[in-house]
Image: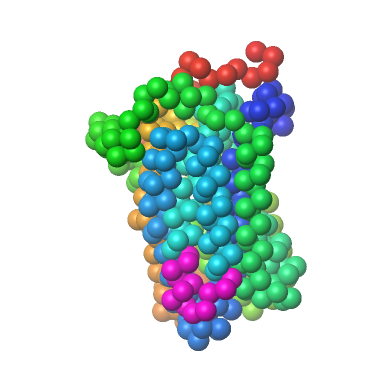
Amino acid sequence: MSILSELRTLTPKQRNTVLASYLGWTLDAFDFFILVFVLKDVAAEFSTSVKAVSYAIALTLMMRPVGALVFGLAADRFGRRPVLMANVLFYSLMELLSGFAPSMTALLILRALFGIAMGGEWGIGASLAMESIPPRLRGPVSGLLQTGYPTGYLIASVVFALFFEHIGWRGMFILGAAPALLVLYIRRGVEESPVFIAHAEKRAEGLVAHAKDMARIGRKHIWLFLYSILLMAAFNAFSHGTQDLYPTFLREQHSFDAHSVGIIVIIGNIGAIIGGLTSGTLSERFGRRRMIATMALLALPVIPLWAYSSTPIFLALGAFLIQIAVQGAWGIVPAHLNELSPNEVRGTFPGFAYQLGNLIVSLAAPLQAALAEGRGGDYSFALASVAAAVAVVLALLATLGVEKHGVAFTSTTPPPAGD
């Protein structure tokens, strides 16, 4: 059954929830990826290096665990829906202000604040969606939700290719404030998670007491939490290591113009969307861990084509194929992490583990840039070496880990229409 056929079995309210969660992550990713296209231009305006500007990416990644914890605790205490709306407004505002940054220092501060907002969105949106659908649809919906990330990258690619030469890097960030409009849709068409509602009577305590309760539950599941952090560190190194410096690689090492760079990255993200949708659905049949390991290892034979080709056609083909593998592995993450999470902390656990993994590899972009610069601008080596090493590590961690495929979140999860 196709993803569209699967989604048709959901009620209208369930579909609204899935769509809102997908769009929240899509637009968040769009705002994040705007920066990766304009590193060179920001560096020129503020008279610094690409490596120095790439620390803005690192700061965003470093601050994401803060957002995952703060917004996650709030979502477990006050509900997924209202906190998701607050989160979308916050990241949209930080994106808008980035377009008016008067200095490199100001931009770094704003990107750190944006990181707090970005860190909160994924966990809330994923838990809201996963708790609102039948267990048998977690795989397909997981794949759909995670394709929001490459879809956001694709939108940033289109905006860069079409508008950058007319509006510059500041105009790109100003356009990034548009996601604030998503709040209107969430407010009108999305209901609160049935799992949150079912456990509402347990949340009468204050926020401080709630945080202490979360800490107690965290200690009880400490090894699961640590494993999840390591797994997500590998996942984040896999995606950021193949995406964040790729536009710079195309512009610096191959001297492609904005239009060519945008087209190549668009093609890569089409592959990412295909990979996420396909593997998320297949994980219902073959299991979460097996599909993650398979997709990670499929990246290895593609790396030479992706990193060492010299023509736009072969670079685009390499980008398409490697992103099928990268986002194919990622397409399973929303379902896998939410299934691993204890019920009481599902608003916090998946997003916090995800973003702590991000923190571990937050310096990936500056380190890759330094590696390339140290070899005379050889971005091919920096990209290929990281991608190959991380693919193997991710496959091993997935294979050696745990899985709770199909575990019941709560007996109150509503069935799909017609069941």
Does residue 82 appear to the left or right of 208 in the view shown?
right
* Residue 151 seen in the figure: no
Does residue 137 appear to the left or right of 297 in the view shown?
right
- Say which quarter of the image contains residue 44: bottom right
- Magenta segment boundaries in residue numbering: 99-111
Q: Position of residue 14 (x, y in %)?
A: 63, 28
| Quadrant containing the N terminus in the rendered view | top right
Q: Position of residue 253 (x, y in %)?
A: 58, 77
- The residue under the point 46% across, 48% down is 120
- Which secondary structure is most common in the magenta stretch? helix
* Vertical order, 286 against 42 (above or below): above
Does residue 108 appear to the left or right of 179 in the view shown?
left
Does residue 194 appear to the left or right of 274 in the view shown?
left
- Say which quarter of the image contains residue 175: bottom right
Q: Position of residue 145 (x, y in %)?
A: 59, 40
Foreground residue among 87 and 392: 87
| Quadrant containing the C terminus in the rendered view | top right
* Vertical order, 107 against 321 (above or below): below
Q: Please tell me whether residue 108 belongs to the stretch shown in magenta.
A: yes
- The residue under the point 55% across, 30% down is 192
Q: Please tell me whether residue 274 belongs to the stretch shown in magenta.
A: no
